[in-house]
Amino acid sequence: MPEIVGVVERLWRYPVKSAGGELLDSVEVEGRGLVGDRLYAVRDGAGRLGSGKSTRRFRRMDGLLRLSARLGPRIDVPELFDPLGMPVPDPDSFLRAYLEQEDVVLAREDAVSHFDELPVSVLTTATLDWVARTVPSAVVDERRFRPNVLLRTPPGTPPFGEDGWFGREGRVKGGVRLAFVRASVRCAMVGAAQPGLPHAPEILKAVAHERDGELGALATVARPGRLRVGDVLSLA
């Protein structure tokens, strides 16, 4: 028998990597992930992507999380918003001035994926509530953890139920199927400041101490389909 694990409470898409996202009522999910998710990134002259960390592939660009983006019916170019929520008419010029870096542009994904890890991330309200209880000094919100899906779990559900999903397939009736693979490794972005959420480094400290830095679930797309707020997710 399928095991019901929760109901889709919110859907998030992040058109520009490391910038704030947009709430959706429904979205098509393809093999790559949510259509339009992390389809764009801020790219520097060396080809590295703007992120909250620096690696061979990523370049730390502080302040991106204070921006946000959304896609219209077409996904040719995302609409970028400044920290006050005002639309930016010329994203490249704005980003160069805002980041004080002359070599950055807003670039669409090409052959190399913009994702840090896997295409779809899911977080339960039970796990999010654990963070709020564990770090009462911080303003806790799912935006800290940038999930694509916030899943409302039944009252009394213990946290970290996501850990039991790995190797199993999550399904919504008549819609998408997600193959859960592993937990999401968290970085300093969970405590970074963004609109309405002040700097809170104690969140990462708690997650690192209690959870080895891992929280939530990552998945690949086993079958494309539509995902809607209110969908019931069950495990095969």
Image: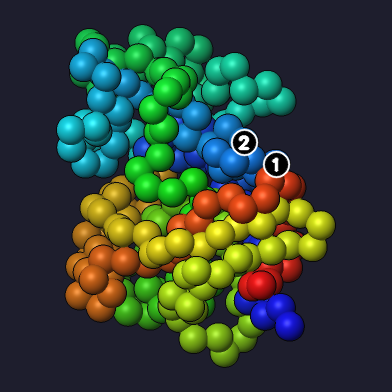
Neighbor class of circle 1 (other Cα within 10 Å; few <14, some 14-19, many 20+) is some
Q: Which of 180 and 82 is in front in this view?
A: 180
Q: Is residue 19 above or below residue 225?
A: above
Q: How many marks?
A: 2
Q: Is residue 31 above or below residue 212?
A: above
Q: In this view, does 90 lie to the left or right of 101?
A: right
Q: Do the residues labelled 2 and 1 touch (CB within 8 Å)?
A: yes
Residue of label 2: 35
The kind of residue on which mark 2 rests is Val
Location of residue 13 in the rendering, given as x and y in whole percent from the top left corner: 56, 42
Whether residue 187 appears in this view of the structure is yes
Location of residue 74 in the rendering, given as x and y in whole percent from the top left corner: 68, 21
Q: Which of 101 and 148 is in front in this view?
A: 148
The disc, 2 or 1, on the residue closer to the chain's N-terminal end is 1
Residue of label 1: 28
Q: Is residue 194 left or right of residue 229?
A: left
Q: In this view, does 230 lie to the left or right of 141?
A: right
